[in-house]
Amino acid sequence: MTGLDRNQTPKTRPVDHKRTALVASLDVGTSKIACMIARLKPSPANDALRGRTHAVELIGYSQIQSRGVKAGAVVDLAECEQAVRQAVALAERMAKVRVESVLLSVSGGRLQGQLVEAAADIRGGAVTADDVTRVTSTGMRHATGEGRTVLHALPVGYALDGVKGIRDPRGMVARQFGVDMNVVTADATVARNLMLVVERCHLNVEAMSASPYVAGLSVLTDDEADLGAAVVEMGAGSTTIATYSAGRFVHASGFALGGQHVTMDLARGVGACIADAERIKTLYGTVLTGGSDARELMSVPTAGEEHDAPQIVSRATIANIVRHRAEEIFEMVRDRLADSPFAAEPRARVVLSGGASQLTGTVELATRILNRPVRIGRPLGFGRLPNEAKSASFAVPTGLLVYPQYAHLEHVEPRHTRQLRTGTDGYFGKVGRWLREGF
């Protein structure tokens, strides 16, 4: 059974400009699972977010502690399934609808994007839609290694007889037609097991998308994407990166280091249990070491025996532990950006998202290490988000709700080649109705 291997993960059909749709997003992370249900309503063009055709009206959401996930990959099916069921049920109860299919994010499985060029001779003189599909399919397959699956195949630009920069080649005349595309892949096993969890909850996977790409759809303005930007989605178990150039998503990468590593370092460094270390990080976590911190002391419960005396730790000790790991993460981000088309964009900026971006002082630290302007990204253009969902840690689940509006940009393999199975009876080739009709 090959399943997703070398195939494309499920892709949603583009949402109709004139129709209201109901969508549900599911972000299965290492530390939290978030489910959001929204109504997409056709809306007039917004200057700052030109690609959006619909306003997103949130009608239900949940966030619970994740179980059975490590570094963005499922490590315990039963535990993860239970947590997903709980998150979806909470969001359904609030929205008063039943969810039938979800948009799913992928942050694990060593995300990797590469720019691929593919070309072919044109038989009939003018470029047809079939030519575009044929050449793009060839390029996509060429870019997909053994054991990998395609999350995105996004044409970046077209060429006719070697002339680049063609926006839409259909109907134009040429002898040779070429396409440059960004093909984003992940480990097929990671993608397949994530789908399996969702299917075991009797839900269809409507589409899968790379976390940093959808985070970008949520937090980037059009101007930033046009000038060049990198979105760094800082999760608990992984850090993933999407780079944009001339308004297009051109590269992706990721590595398995994140906020949870800061927590573990703290637990080891001050001898606390993991729950206490997480609390210390959330309350006092900073990458800045100031003058007064060294003198400011706090007591930390000792891991182990209940009646052990608590330890006295200085705020500076905590800040040093946090800073060391944060520096390591940003140095790895810097190396990844140097290997991507981003390096050639001198005016490009970095936008941080994800829960781990919220440590005090990350912007200053990232600015110093990456040598670029840096800001924290928050979900843009959403009406009536509850306060806790306005933060950088909700960039991915909110971005998934925006994603169907951008689905038309992607190349989708013809149906017969992408009947993907996880090895269960589930079949995701069919385009699901979003939610049971008649809500």
Image (spheres, grey):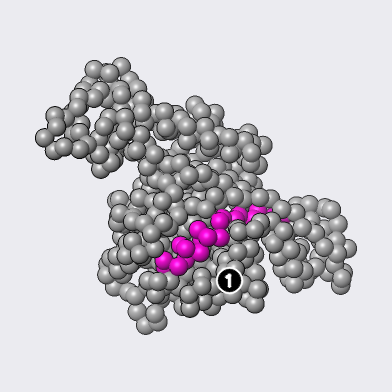
Q: Is residue 45 visible?
A: no
Q: Quadrant of the C terminus?
A: bottom left
| Residue 417 in picture, x, y percent from top left | 65, 73
> Could you say which quadrant of the image residue 383 lies in?
bottom left
Q: Is residue 60 above or below residue 298?
A: below
> Could you say which quadrant of the image residue 362 lies in?
top left
Please identify the residue farthest to the front as the structure is shown.
Answer: 305
Q: Is residue 64 above or below residue 4?
A: above
Q: How many marks?
A: 1
Please identify the residue farthest to the left as the structure is shown.
Answer: 307
| Residue 148 in picture, x, y percent from top left | 60, 58
Q: What's under tag 1, amino acid-wise?
A: Met
Choose between 391 and 285: the one closer to the eye: 285
Which residue corresponds to mark 1?
1
Q: In the image, what residue occupies the spot 20% across and 38% down?
A: 304
> Could you say which quadrant of the image residue 223 lies in?
top right
Q: In the image, what residue occupies the spot 42% across and 46% down?
A: 237
Helix, strand or loop at disc 1? loop
83 left or right of 145?
left
Q: Is residue 438 above or below residue 388?
A: below
Please identify the residue farthest to the bottom as the structure is shown.
Answer: 438
| Residue 170 in picture, x, y percent from top left | 76, 67
Q: In the image, what residue occupies the spot 87% across and 70% down?
A: 123
Q: Local crowd at mark 1 within 10 Å, few (<14), some, or many (≥20)? A: few
Choose between 330 and 307: the one closer to the eye: 307
Residue 185 highlighted magenta (yes or no):
yes
Query: Magenta segment, which residues?
Result: 180-198
Residue 66 highlighted magenta (yes or no):
no
Choose between 327 and 51: the one closer to the eye: 327
Q: In the image, what residue occupies the spot 33% across and 56% down?
A: 67
Q: Is residue 259 visible?
A: yes
